Amino acid sequence: MFDGIVKLENMGCAKLNLADAPRGKMLKVGRFQGGRAFYQKLLSLGFYPGAAVKVISSSKKGPVIAEICGSRVVIGHSMAERISIDC
């Protein structure tokens, strides 16, 4: 199901989050750092652990544009920092 997902062992992905993820590469969503409401919000946007995601655009302070489940989603930078990326 996740053919083409990038392996990020050499990038120290144990601490990699969506805000810092490389643009244009298919990655895999890891864990969320937040409460129940945060988790439910991410699920409603299509984010869930194991989902394939591609960062389209990201900046140091601005929003992150990601492609997930065939849709483009814009989330705040602080929200993206709380979504980890699996190796």
Image (cartoon, rainbow, N blue to C red):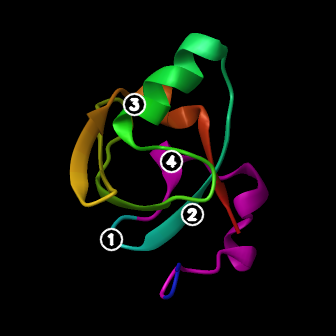
Name the residue that disc number 1 marks.
24
In percent of width and height, residue 28 lies at 57, 63
Query: In screen coordinates, is 4 left or right of 24?
Result: right
As displayed, is residue 49 above or below residue 9? above
Q: Amino acid at mark 1?
A: Gly
Q: Quadrant of residue 7?
A: bottom right
| Residue drawn where x is 67% and y is 70% of the image | 11
The range drawn in magenta is: 4-22
The quarter of the picture where residue 13 lies is bottom right
Q: Which residue is mark 4?
A: 18
Kindly report which numbered mark, 3 or 1, lies closer to the viewer in this rendering. 3
Between the residue at mark 4 and the residue at mark 1, the CA separation in whole angstroms equals 12 Å
Decide: is 68 above or below 1: above
Asked whether, in this view, residue 4 is left or right of residue 57, the answer is: right
- Dot 3 or dot 2: first in sequence order is 2
Is there CB contact under 8 Å for labels 4 and 1?
A: no
CA gap, disc 3 and disc 1: 23 Å
Q: On the image, numbered disc 2 is attached to which residue?
A: 28
Asked if residue 5 is positioned above or below residue 40 in the image, the reply reads below
Q: Is 39 drawn above or below residue 55 in the view shown? A: above
| Circle number at residue 44 | 3
For mark 4, does the 10 Å Cα neighbourhood hold few (<14), some (14 to 19), or many (20 or more) residues?
many
